[in-house]
Amino acid sequence: MLSVVHESVAKAPAELLAPDSGSSDNRLQASEILAAYKKSYTDAVAMHFDGDSFMALSHERQALLRPRNFSAVDDVYCMFVGMLENLPQLRQTYGLSKMINEVVLITEMYRVLRDRGPYTADQVIKDLSGSFAFVLYDNKTKTLLVASDPHGKVAFYWGIAADGSVAFSDDAKLIKQACGKSFAPFPQGCYFSGAGGLHSFAHPTSQLKPMPRIDSQGQMCGSTFKVEQQTGSKPREQGVAMNFPVPHPHH
C-alpha cells in the first residue's frame, strides 16, 4: 500500500529528513511516487484527494497473514495491512456485525473518536491486538491518522518526498526510491496525525526520542523514534487529546 499526504495536511517530524538531504538526493515528487508504485504493482488502484494527497492499493505480492484491505465510508478512507486477534471482541464493543473486517472496524473506531468523544487516540488504538499498520484519511476534515502495532509485526515505512509530502508504505524499496535517505521504519506502537504529530499509544505519557540511523554506506538517514524509558514512575492512564474536527452537515 502507498499513501502520500501533502504537507498542508500533515508535516513529518524534522528528524525524518536526512541531515545531508538537498536538491541532489534524488527524492521524487508525489506524482512520480505514484507512477513508480503503479509500475511495480500493475493492478494498483489509486484514490486522489484535494491538495495532491492520494492513496494507492494493490493485492499483488501480499502475505497470507498480512492482507491489505481498503474502505471508503462517508469520505473517510482507510488502508489496513495485517490481522487483528481481537476482532470479534471489538465488533461487540462497537456494536458492529460479524461481517465487518479490520479496515471497516478502524474506520468506525475513528468515527466514534471523532464524533462522540471524549476519547484520546491512544485510548482507542491501544485496544487493537494483532499485527497491523493502517493509514486513515478523512477527506472532509483533512485529518490523517496513521498507526503501527507495538511489535512491528507488519513492515511499515515513512519518509519525506521532494515536495515535502509525507509518504507511507509497506514497501521498503519503494519508500527508499521515493524519499532517498529521508525515510525510516515507522515507529512501533505509535500513531501519527496531522493535528498532533507523532505519539506512542503503547506508552502515552512517555516522550519519543529521535534515533539517528546510518546506512551500509555510512551515510546519515532519516531518524527513527524510540520511547524514552521512564524510571521510578508508574505510567498514567491518559493520553493526548486529538480534538479531531467534526464535519458539519451541509445546509
Image: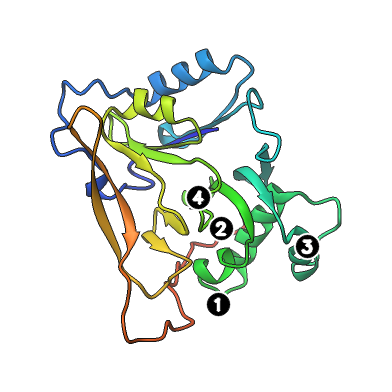
> What is the number of the mark on residue 91?
3
Q: Quadrant of the C terminus?
A: bottom right
Residue sticking out furthest to the front: 216
For marks 2 and 4 on the same chain, the one whose residue lies earlier in the sequence: 4
Which amino acid, mark 1?
Pro
In this view, 131 is above or below 123: above
Contact between marks 3 and 4 (CB within 8 A): the answer is no
In this view, 241 is above or below 18: below
Judge whether residue 4 can be spotted in this image.
yes
Tag nearer the camera, 4 or 1: 4
Which amino acid, mark 4?
Gly
Q: Residue at x 70, y 50 (%)?
A: 102
User: Can you tell which quarter of the image residue 109 is in?
Assistant: bottom right
Could you tell me how far apart the alpha carbons at marks 3 and 4 are, in whole angstroms?
24 Å
Position of 249 with respect to 156 (left or right) is: right
Q: Provide the residue designation for mark 4.
A: 152
